[in-house]
Amino acid sequence: MKRNTDILIKNILASRGRIPHLETPVNKCDEEGGCGVTGFMASIPIAGRHIYEPSVQMHNRGNGKGGGIAAVGLSASDLNIPRDVLEDHYLLQVAYIDDTAIAQVEASHVLPHFDIYKSEKTPTIGDYTSIGLEVKPPEVWRYFVRVKPGVLDPFIRFNGLYEMDKRKAEDEFVFQNSIRLNQAYYASLGEKKAFVLSHARNVMILKVVGYAEQATQYYCLEDFRAHGWIAHQRYPTRGRLWHPGGAHPFSGMHEALVHNGDFANYHAVSEYLNQHNIFPQFLTDTETSVLLLDLYNRVFGYPLEYIIEALAPTTEYDFDRLSPEKQQVYRYIQSQHMNGSPDGPWFFIIARNDPYRDLLQLIGITDTAMLRPQVFALQERDEVQIGLVCSEKQAIDATLQSIAAEDKRFCPIADKYWNARGGSSTDGGAFTFTLKDAGKGDGSKTLITQNKFGETVTIPEGQRHFDPSLDISGSVEDPTYAKKVTAFFEAKDKTGLGQFCISEFAALGFKKIKGICHTVETLAAQNDDQKAMAIDLLTLLNDRAFPTGDKKRSSLLQILRDSLTRIFAASPAIGEKRNSRYAYIDRATREDLRAPMENETILVVNAKAFEPEGEDCDSRMINKAYRLCWKQYICYGYKGQRFTGCGFGADSDGVRFDVYDSSGDYMASGMDGMEIHVHGNAQDQLGQIMKRGKFVVHGDVGQTFMYGAKGGEVYILGNAAGRPLINATGKPRVVINGTCLDYLAESFMAGDPLNGGGFVIVNGIAFDEAGKVMDLPMPYPGSNLFSLASGGAIYLRDPDSKIVEEHLNGGMFAEVAEADWNLILPYLEENERLFGISIEKDLLTVNGKTLPFQKVYRKVMPKQK
Amino acid sequence: MNTTLNSLPETKPVRSRFRNTIGKYTIKRNSSCIACGKCAELCPHGVHIKPDHYSAPFRPVEHNCIGFACKDTDHYCIEHCPEEAMTLKENPLLETMGDYRWTPDMLLGHFAMAETGDLPHVDLEYSLGNSGGGFDKMRFKKPDPGLALDLADERMDTSIDLNKTGDGRPLKTISIPCYGGGMSYGSTALSVIVGRARAAKRLNSLTCTGEGGYPPEFLPYKDHVITQVATGLFGVREETIQNCPVMEFKYAQGAKPGLGGHLLGEKVTEAVAKMRETVVGRPLFSPFPFHSVYSVEDHKKHVDWMKEINHKVLCSVKVSTPTDVDMVAVGAYYAGAHIIHIDGSYGGTGAAPDIAKKNIAMPIEYAIPKVHRFLVEEGARDKITLIASGGIRNAMDVAKAIALGADGCVIGTADLVAVECVRCGNCESGRGCARGIATTDPELGYMIDEAYVEQRLVNMYMAWRKQWCRLLRSFGLTSIKELRGRSDLLVHLDYLDEEERKQYQNSPGYKMVL
């Protein structure tokens, strides 16, 4: 068996070696930066227009010089072909840069080899400039083909591929034919004429010199349905491009891959491919990535786990934590593939069809060092499931909002958001959304989410989504609850009201809750005090984890946030003067901005229509407002707008921000004195160089959180992604209640914490479905903690001493002394006040027993010189 | 074009800080001197000084002596001394000074320029080193004499524009085609960096903070300070970015691409640690690259961030010169940078490890035309300012860099030479700079004061300006902007035949192997 496999591999590679090819240049054709990537896979077909909004919102991750989309699990009816043709035939798509070459290409590379079920020009809109494109996209012809038996048999004979499944040999023929076509009409020519976009079964790729969503517009895919979509905004540094050959996605055989990042070892990877008779033709990182993947997948026949290991090897302490059996296999894989594995920052999203197992998959893989941003999300209910993976969380929210606006079975908020930890022993740095037949016999499909090791990611069962489409009676207030809530408002009993709602919400149905929200909204409209109380209440309910009974928390959040949005929007507009503390401003009314008058104190900013950066961004407008003496801001409606709270300069004491919805990168960076409260998850690069002030996030934070920070008091309810507090100096004081992916406080230089320096408290906890605090399996899963630090300290809640010397590189463990405890206690008390995480009942209680602080917390400090 | 006319600063003689100056020649007076004062009477260069009522002349001011060239004049002191008390020799110290790139002649020439504000009168070759390559092999062509202009220096334009994007941010013009490179608080004495800022103000140019933070002493000169945002983010706060007309991202240094900055523990004194908010005595490493920037799109976000912090600031992007530097440059342009600053491989002080300094990045004279041409092809050349640095030593290097395609240059080492750095290369030896420049030691730092640094730099750049004006005039140009990209005016000695080559001056002390 092994011998046969060996021979087969050799024969496949030898057959590829016979394809005429040019010497591959060692350099890439364009430098390209990271990019914006997004993708989703749903159990039901979704129209292409829903990839539109997330793509638009990631414009600033590309530069409009290359965009592409791919769809898998296509709708046969939208293509006007029978289902079995879709599944059995190859969808060969050729892009004609020079449309005079069509007849020539067809005569040389299509007609002689294939039985064509149908060939057609991919429909387009008439005028490409009408959607803002500057370069005319290539004419794309699609051919539904099978290889002629009279061609396939000699191919198998000539190349000695007898051992190969005949269908797989047919795949290989299609693959090689595309290489030949590209060599003849693309790679070898100065004036490029044509290239193959994709040739898989049930996968379609289209790309343009422009933004990704323009591909869906130009090729009329807005109503075209498919189970899975991925999109890519490219950022090539070369400015003048006249064809989209270098744009993503790229395809090997049955997949489409988009990539965010940049290989440092492009040459080495190309060299490795060359040694296997594979010669890149488009000269980008992405093409080599997909060729590697295809080599591992179709030629070597690796299972997905091994492919991921070959791309992103498990290293350091994570390797030690693998089982001995796994270590042995991985050691073999690494010794074979380490030199060909992509080095540098990369994040892949792959959409693929596995026709041999009848699966559709969406896969996200991060590099071992997690140098690119990535967020995964999942929404599950009985009828529909959707898995998403994006560069930014805001793009996930945008996708869900777009879909949920049309199909009420979806909720605009996902049930779960998370990051992958690259090359780790915990999740392997990769997640797969697999779509398979639901087994109901009606062709319906079900979505399964797994990590690299095949462990499934699940959402607690038995909880219901709120389906607004079934909400036919409008919101009817329950008079008893309305009365109770009103009583609390009249008594100005904020705390009591909060506790009341939290305790009641578990048992109440969605409709009653909507009713309560309605009462709250009505009360809020009556006067400013009640409005403030209403905002406080709904914000508390939005921020706190509490038991929700049989209701999905995501649906509950949707109701609460809708209510908040309505209350915010009801504030008097800045242009009109009414006697209120609140003044509302949005993009349309931003010219009316003026200094606060009379008792006005709070500027309510609807960020929705603002640009994410530049002259017309909300941050710029808020800066102007600050110069006009506005101090308090409620900002909502965010969809990734950046730089909230930046540009205030030194001594911004007295300024307070409350931020709702999908806030963007670089928030709170550079803050010096102000206070920012984020009511939800936040994104990447937050709190950079921050100097002073208070920053509270009721959720997770992303990459390089507080890079180069100098101070500030910071409370994070959830987790931080990779490299938080790297290179921080001065006296930052940070409480992270969850944990971090890796590289926490590398090169930390924050003096002596007992003497005015800085520290980070890591609690290593999470909330379970009932809103109860539970310990994470590892308080710190990464392999590098406090590396190369010369100052400051980490206070780690690690009652079982799970963290060992191997995690440290330059740091050492020390006893938490009385002085240390006195130092951190006030911060834990504030943490308790903000998040309701009790020091005594939650933090110091381990397995039901209350322990002294020395037994629960451990201190990591720099080794003395 | 005469906007710079009135803003040209005044030059003033500033004497050396050291009692014994270094000259190309040594001239000694032995004990047979009868103090007749004849030599002082004769010497027009101020080598011999005997004030009235003094019984004997001062020790000869050797660095003013023009040496054997004096022989043919009527004031050759050696021959006129009635007692034959004088001896003249070439200074043997020169054999131990400098290196191939910064020859002793070039060092002494710049000492003289910084002292007088004029070109040296001693026969010093200050425009060429003998590295055997690079700028030392390049010459400006012999101009057609018919082109020469008769125009006073005051009427010549040596200014360059830093914002060509037309993006609505302020325009910024500097009067000389150079500004100061980053030197951090902690790497050199405070009086040196503040002196540079003072000089920048008088020259209507800029200086750069380096990555060690923005000392409050810079505030009076804030319109002439570039705040550097480097990978360590030391001392970078919003207000430091708001107190500058230009900010600079330092992605890499040509002297050590792939490595971040490194400040030795020794140099992290209490003051330095306070500025950087770190621990006293612990070495400080800056990471490479920015942890938040791993791609062009991250970079754009980074630039956007700076633009939100300071709505008027111009952004400069400093990168080293890898083989794809042209792609990097055009990427920086599309991301909204105003200045792309490419740093070639010759730069760096003694603190950069040799192995990195000499082996990684591309020499700047290769990088400039590569980037220039690529930007021209992209149609972006006139929308971005290209600044070169890394081994730009003197006025002619600046002119050559501009002719190759740069708009201007960033100067680091020459500034230090102006304040009498002898390039001993021991900058990394803790605090112990023998010349009191690259030190944070309070005692050594007192060797130097701001006013001295300021005037020495003003003098040197005004001397450079004279050279630029002379060059421009000879080619019939009135503005240094017209010189940009005129590589047709340059020749490279290696590509000339023997006869042609003879027309051009050889590098000093360098035997050309044919």
Image: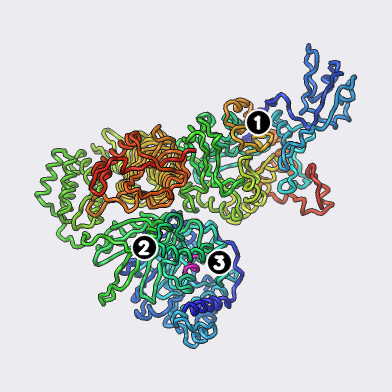
Give the crowd class for mark 3: few <14, some 14-19, many >=20 residues within 10 Å.
some
Q: CA distance from mark 1 to mark 2?
A: 61 Å
SS label for mark 2: strand
Q: Residue at x 40, y 43 (%)?
A: A813
What is the quadrant of the N terminus of chain B in the image?
Answer: top right
Judge by depth and name the residue closer to the eye, A476 or B104: B104
On whether residue A292 falls in the magenta region, the answer is yes
Please report, as a chain letter, where disc 2 is located. Answer: A
**Can residue B224 be seen?**
no
Q: Are the two marked residues, 3 and 1, in contact with CB atoms closer than 8 angstroms?
A: no
Quick check: A644 above or below A121?
above
Instruction: Determine the image quadrant of residue B462.
Output: top right
Judge by depth and name the residue closer to the eye, A111 or B14: B14
Extreme residue in the bottom direction: A150
SS label for mark 3: helix
- Badge 2 amino acid: Asn
- Badge 1 amino acid: Ala
Where does the image place residue A567, in percent across and percent down from the top left?
Answer: 23, 46
Please report, as a chain letter, where disc 1 is located. Answer: B
Extreme residue in the left direction: A480
Q: Which residue is mark 2?
A: A451
Where does the image place residue A83, in percent across and percent down from the top left?
Answer: 34, 79
Q: Which is nearer the N-term, disc 3 or disc 2?
A: 3
Q: Which residue is mark 3?
A: A272
Q: Which residues are magenta?
A: A289-293
Q: Main secondary structure of the magenta part?
A: helix
SS label for mark 1: loop
Judge by depth and name the residue closer to the eye, B397 or B292: B292
Q: CA distance from mark 3 to mark 2?
A: 28 Å
Q: Which residue is mark 1?
A: B434
Please report, as a chain letter, where disc 3 is located. Answer: A
